Amino acid sequence: MNENLKLFFEEVAKSEELQSKLVHAANADEAYAIASETTPGFSKEEFVEAMIELRDEQSDLSVDDLEKVAGGSDDGTIFALGLALAALWLID
């Protein structure tokens, strides 16, 4: 995975505001705009691939694991579900 994408996901894990923005993104273009504005240096294609990888990884995680992925916040499960749902519309 692109190093800048890794940095972006680290920022997401730390920021409830960023998590909320991503969960409420209307489509892939809006999610990518949020991501690239936060941490530039990766293409939309790289972003889409990373989101699909996250969705696939999350399907094997427990609720506790999902909360850890999201930085242990109370909204961790909601954030992880939002990412998984976002990845679904990225494929469409």
Image: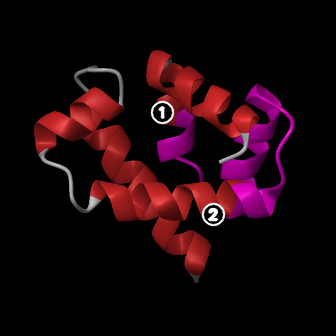
Residue 64, which numbered label? none
Q: Earlier in the sequence, mark 2 or mark 1?
A: 1
| x then y, percent, for residue 34 | 72, 39
Q: Secondary structure at mark 1?
A: helix
Describe residue 67's horizontal placement relative to residue 32 as left or right.
left
Residue beneath the point at 13% across and 47% down: 62
Q: Residue at x 80, y 39 (%)?
A: 36
Task: Identify the residue shown where x is 58% and y is 21%.
Answer: 11
Density class for disc 1 (Cα within 10 Å; few <14, some 14-19, many ≥20) is: some
The percent position of residue 13, horizontal first and vertical second, equals 45, 24
Please state the extent of the stretch shown in magenta in the rendering. Answer: 21-46
Residue 27 appearing in the image: no
User: Is 32 included in the stretch rendered in magenta?
Assistant: yes
Left or right of 22: which side holds 31? right
- What amino acid is at disc 1? Ser
SS for dot 2? helix
x%, y% of residue 58? 30, 55
Which residue, given by chain and number where applicable, does mark 2 sit on? 49
Mark drawn on residue 20? 1
- Classed neighbour count for the residue bearing mark 2: other residues with Cα under 10 Å, few (<14), some (14–19), many (≥20): some
Is residue 92 something that shows in the picture? Answer: yes
